[in-house]
């Protein structure tokens, strides 16, 4: 086992999705007169640990289910290639999830005991994505899971823990963030379509085909910006408009790039999709926060 193999298993290209969800939640949170910073920081730690645990679980359970093969198109899978033992990966999955749960328990100080139910739901979601009797990622439901767990939940709860308010606007924005995050998974599954189809893994790309998921990728980005319109019109109309137009232009460029490359050449598109999401989130937080 090597450090490099573990870093690859973390899937650094995808982690900006966690940052974006919390940053956008904070953008809604700072709209209230009293906004606490520490809960937002803890939300970021929790979201990152939960995503890493999900990535570890995906690698282990896909290997255990025979869905990963050596020499696949995507990033090197340490367990499949023999760089990490299955036992070590399984242990790392639940250790990381346990750390996330510890951070989540601290958040109860601001959110109350009802957050325990949300924490249990998230913990189940981490494993249900790749494991259990009906793994979500194997039945074209991975993108739906991303919208919920990387959009709706982090944006809404970050706003709530900062401000003490459950906001409908934040919930709508959470769906927008989830659509942006789903695009990261769409590129991943678009790249891996042939490999996934050959082992019977029914991702959205396998079920709908290349052309359809490219259209969904494009529409997700547009719909996401529409979801954030109430936020930036209320707090940062000019800067919000500029940030959103820039996002859409870059999003269009990435969509066009998807149609021109395949296989490992899509890895930069995946990373750029995640980075674009996080850049939009941070830019909006700054624009709203300085008002």
Image (cartoon, rainbow, N blue to C red):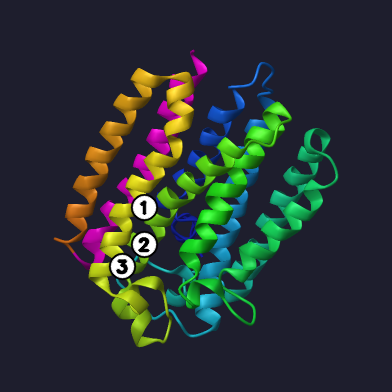
Tags 3 and 2 in contact by the CB under 8 Å rule?
A: yes
Q: Which of 99 and 157 is in front in this view?
A: 157
Q: Which residue is drawn at 39% across and 81% down?
A: 69
Name the element at disc 3: helix
- Identify which residue is drawn at 44% across, 30% down: 282
Residue 286 placement, left or right of 218: right
Provide residue 15's location: percent of width, then percent of height: 47, 48
Q: Which residue is drawn at 51% across and 55% down?
A: 147
**First in residue order: circle 3 vs circle 1:** 3
Q: Main secondary structure of the magenta part?
A: helix
Query: In this view, which residue lies farthest toward the top?
Result: 291
User: Magenta span covers which residues?
Assistant: 262-291
Which numbered marker is on residue 190? 3
Measure the C-alpha gap from mark 1 to mark 2: 10 Å
Query: Can residue 79 be spotted in the picture?
Result: yes
Mark 1 lies on residue: 220
| Residue 172 is one of the magenta-drawn residues | no
CA neighbours of label 2 inside 10 A, class few (<14), some (14 to 19), many (20+): many
Q: Relative to 248, is 196 above or below?
A: below
Report if residue 269 lies within the magenta region: yes
Q: Are the two marked residues, 1 and 2, in contact with CB atoms closer than 8 angstroms?
A: yes
Gap in Å between the C-alphas at discs 3 and 2?
Answer: 6 Å
- The disc, 1 or 2, on the residue closer to the chain's N-terminal end is 2
Q: Which residue is drawn at 39% across and 40% down?
A: 226
Res. 186 mark: 2
Q: Residues within 10 Å of mark 3 (few under 14, many from 20)?
A: many
């Amino acid at each position: 086992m090597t450090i490099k193999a573990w870093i690859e298993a973390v899937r650094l290209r995808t982690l900006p999705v966690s940052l974006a969800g919390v940053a956008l939640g904070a953008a809604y949170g700072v709209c209230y007169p009293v906004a606490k910073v520490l809960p937002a920081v803890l939300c970021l730690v929790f979201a990152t640990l939960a995503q890493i645990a999900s990535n570890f679980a995906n690698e282990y359970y896909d290997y255990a289910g025979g869905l990963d093969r050596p020499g696949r198109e995507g990033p090197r899978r340490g367990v499949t290639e023999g760089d990490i033992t299955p036992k070590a990966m399984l242990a790392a999955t639940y250790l990381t999830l346990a750390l996330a749960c510890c951070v989540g328990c601290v958040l109860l100080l601001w959110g109350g005991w009802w957050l325990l139910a949300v924490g249990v739901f998230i913990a189940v979601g981490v494993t249900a994505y790749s494991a259990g009797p009906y793994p979500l990622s194997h039945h074209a439901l991975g993108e739906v899971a991303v919208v919920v767990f990387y959009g709706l939940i982090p944006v809404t709860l970050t706003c709530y823990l900062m401000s003490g308010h459950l906001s409908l606007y934040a919930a709508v924005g959470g769906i927008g963030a989830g659509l942006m995050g789903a695009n990261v998974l769409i590129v991943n599954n678009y790249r891996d379509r042939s490999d996934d189809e050959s082992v019977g893994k029914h991702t959205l790309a396998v079920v709908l085909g290349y052309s359809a998921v490219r259209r969904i990728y494009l529409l997700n980005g547009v719909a996401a910006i529409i979801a954030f319109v109430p936020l930036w019109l209320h707090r940062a109309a000019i800067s919000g408009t500029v940030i959103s137009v820039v996002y859409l232009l870059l999003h269009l460029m990435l969509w066009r790039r998807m149609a021109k490359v395949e296989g490992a050449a899509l890895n930069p598109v995946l990373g750029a999709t995640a980075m674009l999401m996080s850049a939009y989130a941070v830019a909006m937080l700054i624009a709203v926060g300085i008002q």
